[in-house]
Amino acid sequence: MMEKKYPLPPFTLETAIQKVQLAEDAWNSQDPQRISLAYSLDTEWRNRDTFVNGRTAVQEFLKGKWEKELNYKLKKELWAYTGNRIAVRFEYEWQDQQGQWFRAYGNENWEFNEEGLMEKRYASINDLPIDESERRL
């Protein structure tokens, strides 16, 4: 039986918003195993200047991410959708090992297979150092 991750494409406004919210909730869990289940076994990622291929590599990437990015909190917003693709803009805040806070801004382009698993994720992200008093999330 094929693995499915609902909602399935083609997306409507309602299902695209639902898919974005499910992703936000999963990423805020900071659970690499849970998050990876939204991706196809052979998923392809570009995250900043890092290329990640496959669900197992996604889990390892995310494990390393949250060893570095402490007190992580993310907010995603649907930007556009069509067929099996969704574009998202996001911001998240995190703190490094020395206590410096950052806000990261970015855009992601997602492409899904027929089973609703993300096959491609391309993320462009910029980090901005902030004072703790400037936190919004």
Image (cartoon, grey):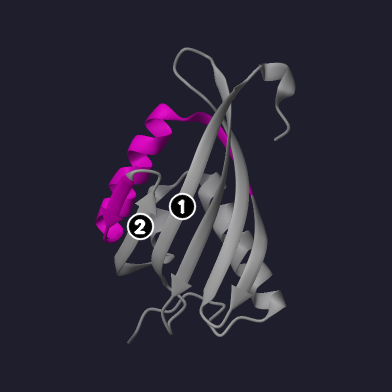
Would you say 131 lies left or right of 111 here?
right
Three-letter amino acid code at the position of disc 1: Ala
Judging depth in this view, the residue of 109 and 34 nearest the camera is: 109
Judging depth in this view, the residue of 61 and 131 nearest the camera is: 131
Would you call the spot at circle 2 few (<14 residues within 10 Å), some (14-19), or many (20 or more)?
A: many
- Tell whether position 45 is magenta: no
Would you say 90 lies left or right of 97 here?
right
- x%, y% of residue 62? 37, 44
- x%, y% of residue 21? 64, 60
Tell me the number on the disc at residue 39. Answer: none
- Tell whether position 57 is magenta: yes
At x 47%, y 21%, the residue is 96
At x 39%, y 66%, the residue is 120
SS state under label 1: strand
Question: Which corner quadrant holds the N terminus?
Answer: bottom left
Q: Which residue is mark 2?
A: 45
Q: Which residue is mark 1?
A: 123
Q: Start and end of the magenta stretch?
A: 50-75
Three-letter amino acid code at the position of disc 2: Trp
Q: Quadrant of residue 134?
A: top right
State whether residue 74 appears in this view.
no
Question: How far apart are the alpha carbons under marks 1 and 2?
Answer: 8 Å
Question: Which corner quadrant holds the C terminus?
Answer: top right
